[in-house]
Amino acid sequence: MCGIIGYIGKRNAIPVLIHGLKRLEYRGYDSAGISFLKDSKIGVRRCSGKIKDLETLIKKEKLKSTIGIGHTRWATHGRPSEENAHPHRADGIVVVHNGIIENYFELREGLKKRGHVFTSETDTEVICHLILRYSKSGYSLEDATREALKHLEGAYAIGVMNEAEPDKILAVKKDSPLVVGIGDGEFFIASDIPAFLKYTRDAMILENGEMAIITRNGVTVHDVRKNETVNKKAIQITWSPAMAEKGGFRHFMLKEIFEQPRAISDTIRGRFSLEKGEVNLKEFSLTESQLKKFNKVFLVACGTSWHAALVGKYMIEDMVRIPCEVDIASEFRYRKPIIPEHCLMIVITQSGETADTLAAQREARRLGARVMTICNVVGSTSAREADGIFYTHSGPEIGVASTKAFTTQLTALYLFSIALAKAKGTRNLKERQGLLNELLQLPEKVEKALYCHDAVKRMAKKYYDVRDFLYLGRGINYPIALEGALKLKEISYIHAEGYPAGEMKHGPIALIDNNMPVLALAPDDTVLEKILSNMEEVKSRGGKLIAVTVEGNTKVNSRTPDIIFMPGTNYYLTPIIFSIPLHLLAYHMAVLRKCNVDQPRNLAKSVTVE
Ligand code: F6R
C-alpha cells in the first residue's frame, strides 16, 4: 500500500503534490518523493522518512512547476531508503506506483541483459525501463505504456510522465485504487479522494484496465485491454474531508476491518503455486531441506500477535505434527527457555518494533534458534535482525487496535504451515492443493463475512452498557475468544475474559448470572457438541448468549436467538472468519460508549519500551 498523486493545471504543482501526499500519508510513510517539469527537464526530489522531511528537503529551492507526480511509500520490495523511494526514473520517463509487480525479478534480469541499468531494489523500476524501451522505438507515451503493461503480472496503480511529452500525465489501474480529479482547467490523479478534495469534488473512479490520458485540455479514458475509448462520467463526492481521509469510514479501525479482503489478497499474491501445491520460499531465506530439519517450533509475540501465535500452534501441530511452544515475548526472555538443536523461532509482530518481542528474538538467536519474523513493516528492526522474513502486505495499520494485521498474520501462518507440511511430507500434493484452493477463496469469504455488520450492530446496541463480557471458544478458536475479549477491553473499557469453554466448570461459571453476556464461538467442527453443552450450562444459569456459527448450522438455534452466521471454510481458516464479528462487536460497543476507538486511553500503536 502506497499513496500516489499527480497534478496538471495552472497552479504551482509543488504545494498541491505535498498537500495531497500529506492526505495520503496514512497509506504509507517510510519515504516520499515528487517529480516535476522545470525548464523542459524532469526534476526528481526524494527522501526516506515522512512528507515533512520531503518538505524540508525542497523548501529552500522554491520550486515552481505546473505539472508533477508524487508518492508516499510503504515498502514492499526493498528497504525504505532514498534510492528505493518513488518517483523512479529511466532517462526521461518517471513513474510512481502503488501495488506489487510479481514478475519484476525476471523482467529486471531481461532488461539488464539489454543494457538497462537499475539503481533501486524496487519492483517499480522495471515499469520505467519497459516504458522507456518502447518509447525509444518511437511509441507515444500511451502506446509505450500500453506495451509495457503487457509484460506486468501483479497489481498496480501508476502515474507516468515523460520529458519528451511535457503536457501529459498518464494514470493506469489494475487491482490498486486510482481516481482522477476534475477541476476547472486543472486535473489530479490520486490513490484516494482526500488527496484533492480541497480543490475539487468531481472525480472519475478508474476501473481495472483503464488508462486516463490527462493533458491541460482534459481527460480521455481508454480500456487498454479492449483498446477502445471509454465514455466515463465524473461523479460528485459528498464526503467531508475528514470522512474522506478514512475512505468514508468513521474510524480507521472500521476502515481497516473492511480492508481485510484486499489485505489478505495482497498477502497471498504471488506466494504459491496451486498446480505444484507449493509455497514460494524465496523470502523466508530457507530451503526445503533446511525446513525439513526443524523438529521444534517456538512462536513468540505480544498482545493480538500472540493470539495469532496461539492459532499458529494449532495449525502447525495439526498439519505438520511437530511440537510447538507459544510464549508471550516478555515471558520468554526471562524464563531461561530450552532451545534444542534444529529449532525454529517464529516471531510475530505487526510493527516489527515491539521491545519485548525484539528482546525475545535476540535471545532466541543467541541460544541458537533460527528466527523467522512474520511482520508488516518492511525494513523494521525485527525484519532486519531475522534470518528469514514473511511480510504480511496488509498496508499501514493506523488504528491502535490491530485487525487486518492480525488476520494477515494468520494467513501467513497458514501458508508457512503448508510449506512446512510439504517439507516434512505430512500433506500430499492433493491435500496441499485443497488447502491452497481454500485460501484462494478466502478474500471472497471474508467479504461475505463482513455482511454480518448490521447483525453485529444490533447486538452491540443490546449489550453496550454491560460491565463484564465472556468469550468462549475451543481448540483453534480458543485464541479467538481471547482476541475478542482483548479487543473489547482495550477499546470499550468493558471488563472481558476469553476462556476455553471446557474450563468454565472449573471456576468461571460462578460468574454467570442474568447480567453476564457470553459469546460462544461454535464452528461446525469436531467440538461443536461440546460447545453446545457449554452453551446449555450458561443458558440454564441465566447468562445471555450470543453464538457465532457457520451458515447452515441449525444446532445452535434452540440455545439463543442471537446468532451470527459466518461463511464456512476449513478448520485452519475459521479463526480468520470468526475474528471478524468479534472485532466489529468491540468496535460498535466502543462507539456507543463514546470511546476514542482509534486511540484508546493509555495505549500506543508501537510498544517500544519494556
Ligand atoms: C491489540 C494490539 C496489541 C499488539 C501488540 C503487539 O489490538 O494491537 O496487542 O498486537 O502490542 O504489537 P506488534 O504486533 O506490533 O508487535
Image (cartoon, rainbow, N blue to C red):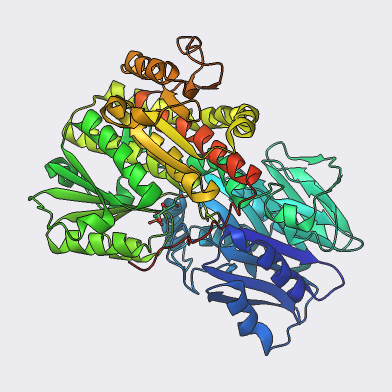
Which is nearer the eye, 248 or 467?
A: 467
**What residue is at 49 percent from the left and 61 percent from the top?**
602
The picture places residue 524, in percent across and down from the top left corner, at: 40, 16
Image quadrant occupied by the C terminus: bottom left
Q: As drawn, is 207 to the left or to the right of 382?
A: right
Is residue 564 shown above or below 73? Answer: above
**What residue is at 65 percent from the left and 79 percent from the top?**
55
Q: As drawn, is 266 to the left or to the right of 249?
A: left
Image quadrant occupied by the N terminus: bottom right
Is residue 38 shown above or below 437? Answer: below
Q: As drawn, is 470 to the left or to the right of 184?
A: left
Q: Residue 387, can we see it?
A: no
Q: Residue 246, can we see it?
A: yes
**What residue is at 59 percent from the left and 40 percent from the top?**
589
The picture places residue 521, in percent across and down from the top left corner, at: 42, 26
Which is nearer the eye, 464 or 157?
A: 464
Which is nearer the eye, 404 or 291?
A: 404
The picture places residue 8, in percent across and down from the top left corner, at: 80, 66
Is residue 121 shown above or below 370? Answer: below
Q: Residue 501 appears in which quarter of the rendering?
A: top left
The picture places residue 365, in percent across and down from the top left corner, at: 18, 61
**What residue is at 58 percent from the left and 75 percent from the top?**
46
Q: Residue 600 appears in which quarter of the rendering?
A: bottom right
